[in-house]
Image (cartoon, rainbow, N blue to C red):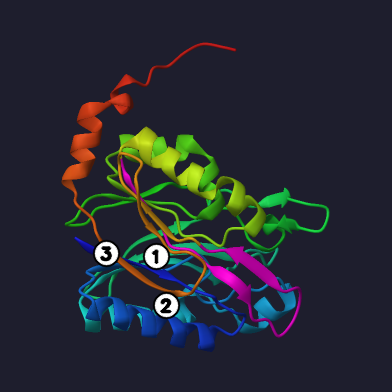
Amino acid sequence: MRTALAQMTSGDDPGDNLRQVQWMLAEAAAEGAEFVLTPEVTNCLSASRTHQNEVLRPESEDPTLAALRQQAEELNIWLLIGSLALKTDDPDGRFANRSFLIGPDGGIRARYDKIHMFDVQVTPEETYRESDGFRPGDRAVLAQTPFGAVGMTVCYDVRFPHLHQALARAGAEILTVPAAFSPVTGAAHWEALLRARAIETGCFVLAPAQTGTHPTTRGKTRRTHGHSMAISPWGEVLVDGGTEAGIHVFDMDRTLVEDARAKVPSLSHIRDFHGP
């Protein structure tokens, strides 16, 4: 299946980001892509909670979601919106970091709220507290499509193999990992983690990423690692998007899932154990 990863440099203006991603979807479709994936926080990448409160909307009112659903229908493509930052009705005012799988009819086929929050201190100067602004999800999501079952995850989820193994044991053949990865952790861990998740599950791992220095009108400027990747079920790197924004198109052969799992059927060898 002809597939495309959209590598973006989203800023904190949802309108500008929407124009960027719409151009990328049109370009991907023109190159024959039937399944297109965008990165985490496609609609707004911002470190300012005040700014986010001003520009973000609930799912039912979000203009990016509405426009991309319409465009998916017009282009007759499957679309993974890596995630959107959305307002919720939570009493504490925290947002959702929500991934959407859109069908070629424009319908929402699945939603997934990122489970694991990026609360880390990478360096003395680089600290993240995602849970201050975003509430974690609590449900793994598997979506059925004509080209295989899709297990949905987001960014920091990639560090938790039990989630991906559970999705694969439930039938996933494709794992999606849209991201806005830190340059420091990205350089050290990104490719290794993605390849590990593919190898241990025998799944394709599709990871569209944010890249570069992100335009901001308020708050701290953010940089991300880039290197959108597609990994085969055998752990081979099929796509490495480098550090420039753009579309990366490749062919995904579903039979590679069966081949990898026949060679090393580790999912069927998982055993319960006691201890430590």
* Amino acid type of the residue tagged 3 in the rendering: Thr
Q: Is residue 72 left or right of residue 241?
A: left
The one of 206 and 93 positioned closer to us in this rendering: 206
Residue 68 picture location, percent across and down:
36, 79
Relative height, residue 118 to residue 80 (above, below): above
**Which one is closest to the eye, mark 1 or mark 3?**
3
Look at the image and say whether residue 261 sits in the magenta stretch.
no
| In contact (CB < 8 Å): disc 2 and disc 1 | yes
Which residue is at the front of the view, 253 or 11?
253
Q: Residue at x 83, y 53 (%)?
A: 124
Can you say whether 170 is above or below 151 in the image?
A: above
Gap in angstroms between the C-alphas marked 2 and 3? 20 Å
Left or right of 199, for residue 148: left
The image position of residue 140, as x and y in percent, is 43, 46
Instruction: Give the distance between the C-alpha atoms of the residues marked 1 and 3, in whole angstroms.
Output: 17 Å
Binning the other alpha carbons within 10 Å of mark 3 as few (below 14), some (14 to 19) or many (20 upward) gives many
Check residue 218 for magenta coloring. Answer: yes
Place of residue 238 in the rendered image (x, y in percent of width and height, measured from the top left): 33, 53
- Quadrant containing the N terminus in the rendered view: bottom left
Residue 100 is marked as 1
The residue that label 3 is drawn on is: 3
Magenta range is 203-226
> Would you name the residue on which mark 2 appears?
65
Count of marks, rendered view: 3
